[in-house]
Amino acid sequence: MLGKKKNSFLVASTVFVLVMGAVALLDNETSSEQIDSEHSIDHSLVANAHKEANTYRKKILEKALPKKATGSAAYRNFVDSAVTTDQYLEELRIGQAKEFLKTSFKSLKDCYREGCGQLPDEDDGFYDPALSIAQQSLKRLLEITARHPKKLDLRNWMEESELLDLLGAENQGLRQAAFENLVNLKGTKEAFQDILEKTRELQGEAAGDALKNMLTFVNEDNKQDLIDSMALISKEGSSATVLGILENLSELKVSQSQINQITEGLCRFKEKKSESHNVAAMSYYLKSMAANSGIELEAQNYCL
């Protein structure tokens, strides 16, 4: 079974720790003579860990994707970590690349919530959806389509509803890539309204990330729509969702009436002792927003 033997998450973590350790040493300008042998990087261990992780990744993808897709040059480029998103289309026929990406997107999208066959570790049950091969692969796929929307004829096969759904994925990079594809697909104005509406359904960090991404497109004509969504989430969302929004939008410049509108729904958290730490964080971000906007929180309209 794919869940036996090596845990892909532990393998990936090993690679990350070793690489980051090497970066830290370089950042500190530590010469090779100063590095104790006990702290030196075992390059063979890094290579073996990378090889095992890549093998496991291919097993999952070859189970999730149609055999025709995994036998193509487009697939080989896709699983080759040395091939960047900018380089992906090089030496590939556009038609072949488009067909592979189209087929793979549908297959991975259909199974990513269940991990596309990836199992938790048998020893400790560890499984993080954000680190799953399915979500990491969808992220890479959408980063490619975001870079080449016209060449890949994105508007004729990518569905807006599928991308909106991915705004709620656990992987932050996947959410970002879905956002970029939505803008490419629908245009700034239409995408803004569609994403804004979807944001009202999102939870936790996903809601904050979506609204933060939209700041680039905020103007005087649509800012109030953004404020209305923030106010609705303040009234109905969980404390984690509200915090995600306030943290990501603390630099948004608002008027006195707009910040009053945002804070109106937050009094419900003040009444719960279990939310005391979250209330303190909310208050901090709201005060930052007020300071950045050159206004003050009015005592009669502020209960935190």
Image (spheres, helix red, strand yellow):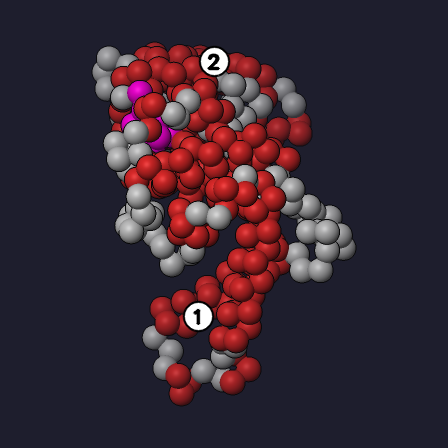
Of residues 84 and 169, the one drawn nearer to the viewer in this rendering: 84
Whether 163 is drawn above or below 146: the answer is above
Span of residues in magenta: 179-186
Q: Is residue 128 visible?
A: no
Q: Position of residue 148 (x, y in %)?
A: 28, 37
Of residues 212 and 178, the one drawn nearer to the viewer in this rendering: 178
Q: Position of residue 102 (x, y in %)?
A: 42, 33
Label 1: element kind: helix
- Residue 298 lies in the magenta-colored region: no
- Residue 180 lies in the magenta-colored region: yes
Q: Residue at x 54, y 39 (%)?
A: 66
Label 2: element kind: helix
Q: Is residue 99 visible?
A: yes
Q: Are marks 1 and 2 in contact (CB under 8 Å)?
A: no
Q: Mark 1 highlights which residue?
A: 22
- Identified by mark 2, the residue type is Leu
Label 1 crowd (10 A; few <14 / some 14-19 / many >=20)? some
Whether 258 is drawn above or below 275: the answer is above
Q: Residue at x 46, y 64 (%)?
A: 20
Q: Which mark is residue 72?
A: none
Q: Position of residue 258 (x, y in %)?
A: 35, 14
Left or right: 286 in relation to 277: left
Q: Residue at x 55, y 20 (%)?
A: 237
Q: Say how many tags the image has.
A: 2
Q: Which mark is residue 232?
A: 2
Observer-side mark, 1 or 2, equals 1
Estimate the spatial distance between the alpha carbons at disc 1 and disc 2, rounded to whole Å.
46 Å
Of residues 214 and 29, the one drawn nearer to the viewer in this rendering: 214
Q: Residue at x 40, y 50 (%)?
A: 73
Residue found farthest to the bottom = 33
